[in-house]
Amino acid sequence: MARKAPFWRGFGLLLVPITSLLVTSLQAFQEDWSTARISDEPEFLAPIHNLTTPVGREATLSCTVSNLGKYKVAWVRAEDQTILTLHTKVVTHNSRISVTHDNLKTWHLRIRQLKESDRGCYMCQINTSVMKIQQGCLDVYVPPDIINDDTSGDLSVSEGENATLWCRATGHPTPRIAWKREDSKPIILRKGPRQEERVETYNGTNLHFWRLDRKQMGAYLCIASNDVPPAVSKRIALNVNFAPSIKVPNQLLGAPLSTDVHLECYVEAFPNTINYWVKNRGEMLLNGSKYTISETRRGYKVSMQLVIHNFTVPDIGTYNCVSTNSLGRAEGTLRLYGQ
Ligand SMILES: *[C@@H]1O[C@H](CO)[C@@H](O)[C@H](O)[C@H]1NC(C)=O
Ligand SMILES: *[C@@H]1O[C@H](CO)[C@@H](O)[C@H](O)[C@H]1NC(C)=O
Ligand SMILES: *[C@@H]1O[C@H](CO)[C@@H](O)[C@H](O)[C@H]1NC(C)=O
Ligand SMILES: *[C@@H]1O[C@H](CO)[C@@H](O)[C@H](O)[C@H]1NC(C)=O
Ligand SMILES: *[C@@H]1O[C@H](CO)[C@@H](O)[C@H](O)[C@H]1NC(C)=O
Ligand SMILES: *[C@@H]1O[C@H](CO)[C@@H](O)[C@H](O)[C@H]1NC(C)=O
């Protein structure tokens, strides 16, 4: 308190001893005064600290009183006025509650294995003729938990349709919901035909997609977090279905006789396709000594390869790569001639 009187300082050196004298006697007076009061009645010496504790842990609220004398301290739950402890005894039927004291001065209300129902304020009461009360509050934090029944499951949507992924979580404080792609690529959001936005993280319970396209297919993570670790996440696969489309990089191929000729087609489709090669709109080509057929997939993209070994005159003609899935069929055409 003495330090809060800086205006003394300007008055010069002479005043300093007087200042300190005044302060000393003021402190002495305060002590005398409070001791005098204490000899009659108990007093609270400090406010009860509020606590924030995760569920399952334990919390101890402490109430410090001076000169308790013949009086007793009780802990009472403020919400419903339930008396929990009286002096050194626990009076409520709750094995998680206990009370201890340090020389009748500091009274500790200990609650073990905290439940959400323990959240609230607690009063420390002294049974003086006019009851003395002070209270402290306990906030019980609960880590986030995703409510599976109220969160999207894996979803399959046709390209061009709208879709919404949603995610709900419990916890205290209320968890924040954020979305990310599992492959760490940005989330593509479209608000209109030409309004495209890419974000690493999207905040919000609902993730809306307007007219989905294939690039938005993937696994999304809904991440729920609050101030209590651990954060939790759920993986939601969003499949975008579309019929195959084929691109042929080289539609006209000339090759020297007796060499191996490489033919290639690029397919995009989902769900997965059945792919094959046809010669002169007739026979389907089979893997073997004449033809090597292979394909490489990356997501919804497939590269189809055909190698014709020892190119000879009968091999000249038209080749088609064909791709089908449940939504449709596509084919590409390549013409092969000898050089
Ligand atoms: C404890 O929390 C209560 C309610 O949230 C508030 O009114 C009070 O001022 C807080 N006490 C202290 C010592 O911070
Ligand atoms: C306070 O409560 C205790 C226990 O009930 C009792 O023994 C004591 O007489 C009470 N004191 C006053 C002043 O009411
Ligand atoms: C997608 O949403 C937009 C805007 O809400 C709406 O105009 C459109 O008809 C929807 N498209 C489909 C395929 O449901
Ligand atoms: C999402 O929320 C986090 C944490 O609250 C914040 O740091 C971030 O800036 C938010 N992102 C957006 C795009 O609002
Ligand atoms: C064709 O055979 C080659 C090796 O002989 C093999 O690597 C390839 O996977 C086969 N392709 C198909 C479609 O079975
Ligand atoms: C390629 O085909 C020709 C004609 O059928 C044949 O004479 C030749 O031996 C073949 N070459 C190889 C490497 O198989």
Image (cartoon, rainbow, N blue to C red):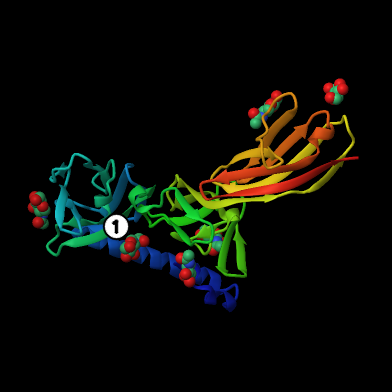
**Residue position marked by numbered label 1 in the rendering:** 136
* Picture layout, residue 94 above or below residue 186: above
Residue type, numbered disc 1:
Gly
Question: Residue at horizontal 45%, vertical 59%?
Answer: 164
User: Looking at this view, is 191 or 12 the one in front?
Assistant: 191
Q: Is residue 157 left or right of residue 39?
A: right
Whether residue 72 is visible: no
Give how far across and how far down residue 41 sits, in percent: 19, 59
Q: Quadrant of the C terminus?
A: top right
User: Looking at this view, is 117 or 184 the one in front?
Assistant: 184
Give how far across and how far down residue 18 sits, in percent: 50, 71
Question: Residue at horizontal 26%, vertical 57%?
Answer: 120
Give how far across and how far down residue 187 sits, in percent: 58, 56
Give how far across and how far down residue 267 sits, in percent: 66, 46
User: Looking at this view, is 335 or 96 the one in front?
Assistant: 335
Whether residue 255 is visible: yes
Q: Quadrant of the N terminus?
A: bottom left
Is the CB atom of the residue marked by disc 1 within 8 angstroms of ligand 1's nearest atom?
yes
Q: Is residue 106 left or right of residue 28?
A: left
Question: Residue at horizontal 24%, vertical 42%?
Answer: 100
* Picture layout, residue 307 above or below residue 149: above
Badge 1: few (under 14), some or many (20 or more) residues near its Cα, within 10 Å? some
Q: Is residue 71 left or right of residue 51?
A: left
* Picture layout, residue 150 above or below residue 9: above
Q: Secondary structure at mark 1?
A: strand
